[in-house]
């Protein structure tokens, strides 16, 4: 159960972080886009640097995969099931020793 939780935590927290850093490195190494492709991609002209940063963040979030709640709920149900099933067996197992 602990191993499953560690693997789950790694795949939910560390793996997306690592993937994001790799994607950022790839984007830094790619050649800069031409002005015509930037104009075609960015229809909205930002007024200041803060708005430009916000638009870049929104565009990056739009490209993310859709968030599915089913996997999170399934994980919580499985953990609850383990606790309910094994909480009754644990006192019996400990009292034997």
Image (tube, grey):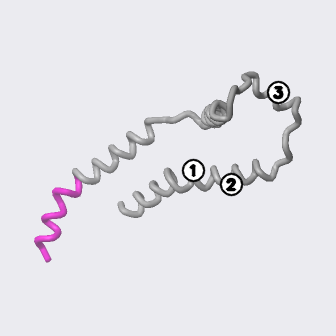
Q: Nearer the viewer, residue 91 or 16?
A: 16
Residue drawn at x 63%, y 50% as measured from the top left: 20
Tell me whether circle 1 and circle 3 mark residues in contact (CB < 8 Å). no
**Which of the two marks, 1 or 3, is nearer to us in this view?**
3
What mark, if any, has residue 8 been given in the picture?
none
Q: Residue furthest top?
A: 43
Image quarter where the N terminus lies is bottom left
Q: Label 2, secondary structure: give it.
A: helix
Label 3 close to label 2 by CB (< 8 Å): no
Using the image, tell me which numbered label, if any, was put on residue 22. Answer: 2
The residue drawn where x is 50% and y is 52% is: 13
Residue sticking out furthest to the bottom? 97
Vertical side of 51 occupied by 8: above or below:
below
As measured in the structure, the alpha-carbon distance from the residue carrying label 1 to the one carrying label 3 is 30 Å
Residue to which mark 3 is pinned: 39
Q: Is residue 91 magenta?
A: yes
Q: Position of residue 60 (x, y in %)?
A: 65, 37
Magenta-drawn stretch contains 75: no
> What is the CA distance from the residue labelled 1 to the residue labelled 2?
10 Å
């Amino acid at each position: 159960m602990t191993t499953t939780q560690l693997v789950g935590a790694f795949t939910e927290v560390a793996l997306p972080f690592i993937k994001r850093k790799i994607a950022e490195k790839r984007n830094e190494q790619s050649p800069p886009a031409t002005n015509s492709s930037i104009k075609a991609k960015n229809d909205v002209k930002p007024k200041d640097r803060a708005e430009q940063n916000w638009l870049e963040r929104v565009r990056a979030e739009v490209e993310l995969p859709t968030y599915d709640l089913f996997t999170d709920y399934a994980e919580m149900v499985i953990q609850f099931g383990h606790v309910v099933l094994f909480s009754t067996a644990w006192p019996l197992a400990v009292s034997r020793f």
